[in-house]
Amino acid sequence: MSKLNPRQQEAVKYIDGPLLVLAGAGSGKTSVITRKIAYMIEECGTKGRNIAALTFTNKAAREMKERVSQLVSGPAARGLIVSTFHNLGLRIIRKEHQCLGYKSGFSIFDAQDAQALIKDLLIQEHGEDNDQADHIQHRISNWKNDMVNPEQAIAQADGPADMLCAQAYLRYQRALKAYNALDFDDLILLPVQMFQQFPEVLQRWQRRIHYLLVDEYQDTNISQYLLVQMLIGDRGKLTVVGDDDQSIYAWRGARPENLAQLQDDYPNLKLVKLEQNYRSTARILKAANHVIDHNPHVFEKALWSELGYGDPIRVIRCRNEEAECERVVTEILDRRVRGHGQYADFAVLYRGNFQARLLELKFQVHNVPYKISGGTSFFARNEIKDIMAYLRLLINRDDDNAFLRIVNVPRRKIGASTLEGLGTYATERGISMFDACDEMGIEQSLPEASVKRLRQFSAWMNRVTQRCDSGEGMAAIREMVSDIDYEAWLHQNSSSSAVAERRMANVFTLIDSLQSTLEKADDDEDNIQAAVAKLVLRDLMDRQEEDDESMDQVQLMTLHASKGLEFPHVYVIGVEEEILPHRVSIEEDNIEEERRLCYVGITRAKQTLALTYCGKRKQYGELIDCAPSRFLDELPYDDLVWEGEEKDLELNQQRGQDTLSGLKGLFDSF
DNA sequence: CATCGTATAGTTTTT
DNA sequence: CTATACGATG
C-alpha cells in the first residue's frame, strides 16, 4: 500500500460502493486493480471466489493474474476470477447451457466462420452474396451488441436493405442454433438474456460474485454493460477503471459513454482521478494533453509527471514512404549503437497494417531484428483452421461448418455434388450433415460410391470420438492427426517443404497448448470440450508469445495494438491527413476517435517520441501528395523540433520554426 | 481436381 | 501496386 500514491490508495480502500477510477495513460491502473484485489482478500477478509476482475484481452487477464498471485497466495485467493468478458461468458454458458437449449459440446464460430456461414445463407436464399456478407455481418454484430434480437431487428428495420439484413440475422441465428454453435457476441449476449429470463440463475451468480472490477471500461458495449449491471445487482459493489481519452474501439460497438452513464446509474458513485503518470517525460505528457484538449470532455483530466522535462519531440518530414521507413530504421540502428538502448526499447507505430509492409522490408535490408504484432493471427492460418475444424467436429457433430471444411481435407473423394445431395437430405430431415451420412435414406439420393465414402469417414470419426470419450483424449487427437496424414497433405499443398514444416510446427503448437491446459486442470471441469472452446478464444496460447517477448527486437504494430503498452522510444509514422486522421474518418466526420488514437500513440513513449510524415506517397501505384496531419498543429509548438528534407525548410519557417534546427535537419538529410 | 488467369478491392480488429 | 478470391479450363 505504501507504494501507492494517495489517489491510488483512495481507490483501493473504497470497497463498499460503486467507484469510477478515471485513470489516465500510465497512471498505474493495473496496480490499483491488483492491489485492490489483494487488499480485499488480505485486509477485508473477502474470499477470492467472491471477486471477479474482467478485462478485454487475454494478455491483460494473464498479466493481472500474474501480478495478483505475487501479492496474495494461499487458500484465501482460491476461486478468484480474473478473465476476459468473453471467457466469463463462456464459463457461464458452459455451466448453464441446458437453460439456453444448447447441447454441451457446442462450437464457437470466430469471425471467419460466421462470415462463411452468412455467405452460404445468402447464396442459398438469393443465389449470390452480392458482396453483402461483410456488411451484414457487421450489422448483425451491432444488433447483438445492442441486445436486439432478430425479431426486434425485423420489426425495427429501416428500409428494404435493412430488412434484408434483419432477415439474414434471423436465418443466421437459426443456423447457429442448428449447428449447436455460438459466435463471439453470443458469449456475452446469451448470459444476459438468460439472466433476464431466469432470475434464479442470476441470483446464483450474484451469490458467487460479490465484487466486480472492470478494466478498460470505456471499451464496454451495451451487452457487456448489462452483464456487469446484472451481476452487480443492487449491491453496487463495483470498481471500474477507464479512460475516455483512450476509447479507440467505438467503431466496434464500444460505448465510452458508459463511463458517464455510471453517474446516473449510481447516484452515490465515487470518482477518483489518477493523473500522475509514471511512464513518460513531462514534455511528452504536455504534448499528449495539448492534442487531446481539442476533444470535448465529460471528465476533465490533466496528466502530469515527475520524470523530468525530457527531450523535445521530433517531427520528421520525409520525401516519401520509402525515405520514411529508411529513416526510422537507420535511426534506430544508429541510436542503439550509440548506447541509447536495445532494439526492444524501440517501437514503430502506424495507422494501417499496409504500412508494415515497407517497414518490414527495410528492417530486413538493414538486418535489424523486429517483431510485427497483429497481422495474420495464429488462428487465421489454414492449417490451424483445419485442425480446429476436426476438433470441433469431434466434440460437436452438429457443426456442419466444421464438417464441410474437413470432410474432404485431406482428399477423400467427397466432392461438391455429393455434399450438395447430403446437404439437401440433411436439411429436409432437420439433422446435421454428419448424422445424415449414416442414415439409410441417403442411398436413394446419392450414388453408392459416394455413400460408401461418406460412411467410411463417419465411421472413422466415430472411432476417434469414442477413444476421446473413453479418457484418452490427447492420444486420440494425436492419432487422428497422424491418421489423416496431415503432414503429407501440407507438403502437397505448400510452395516449399520449409513452409510445410513451419505449418506442421503450428499444428503441434496447437496440440501442445491443448494438452497443457488439460494438464493444468485448474478450472472446475476441465475436459476436451472446455479446452477446445477456450482455444477458439485464443486463451491458452501463451507459450509462443513468451519466448518472443524475451528477444531483443524492435516492436512494430498498429496504434490500436499499442494500447496498454509502453516503450522508451516511440516512432509514429505516417502522421498525415488521410492516414492519421484516416480518410474515411474525415469523410464521416469522426475526427475525435482518430485524435484519441494519436493520443494513445504519443502516450506510449517513455523517453523520446518522433513523428514522421511524407511529402509524397505511392498509393495503389499512383503517386499522391500528402499533407501533414492536423494533429501536428495541435502539438505545443515550443516543444517540437522539425527535421527532414530541405524543401521543408520553407514550410517550417512559415510555422515560425527557428532556422537553426531547420538547417540541422537539412544537414541530417544528407 | 488443380492450375492458371483475371477481376477486384484495398482502416483500425481486444474476443 | 499487390494480394486474394473466384472462375474457366485442361
Image (spheres, coloured by chain):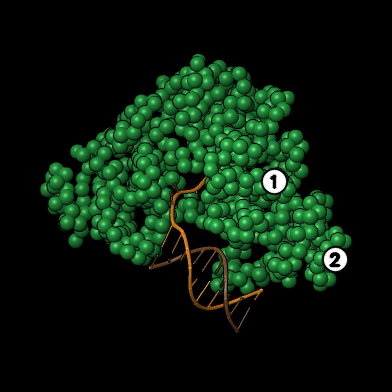
Chain colours: A green, B orange, C brown
Amino acid type at image mark 1: Arg
Determine the residue positioned at 60% across, 30% down: A227
A511 versus A283 height, above or below: below
Read off the residue under disc 1.
A174
Image: A127 above or below A210: below
- Secondary structure category for the residue under label 1: helix
| Amino acid at the residue labelled 2 | Glu
User: In the picture provided, is A662 more to the left or to the right than A351?
Assistant: left
Judge from the rendering whether residue A416 lies leftward or rightward of residue A283; answer left or right.
right
Could you tell me residue A93's position as x and y percent? 69, 37
Residue A155: percent from left, percent from top:
61, 37
Q: Quadrant of the C terminus of chain A?
A: bottom left
Residue at image position (26%, 51%) is A627
x and y percentages locating residue A568 in the rendered image: 35, 44
* Most foreground residue, A577 or A14: A577
Disc with the residue nearer the chain's start (2 vs 1): 1
Q: Disc 1: which chain?
A: A
Structural distance between the alpha carbons of marks 2 and 1: 28 Å
* Residue topped by disc 2: A443
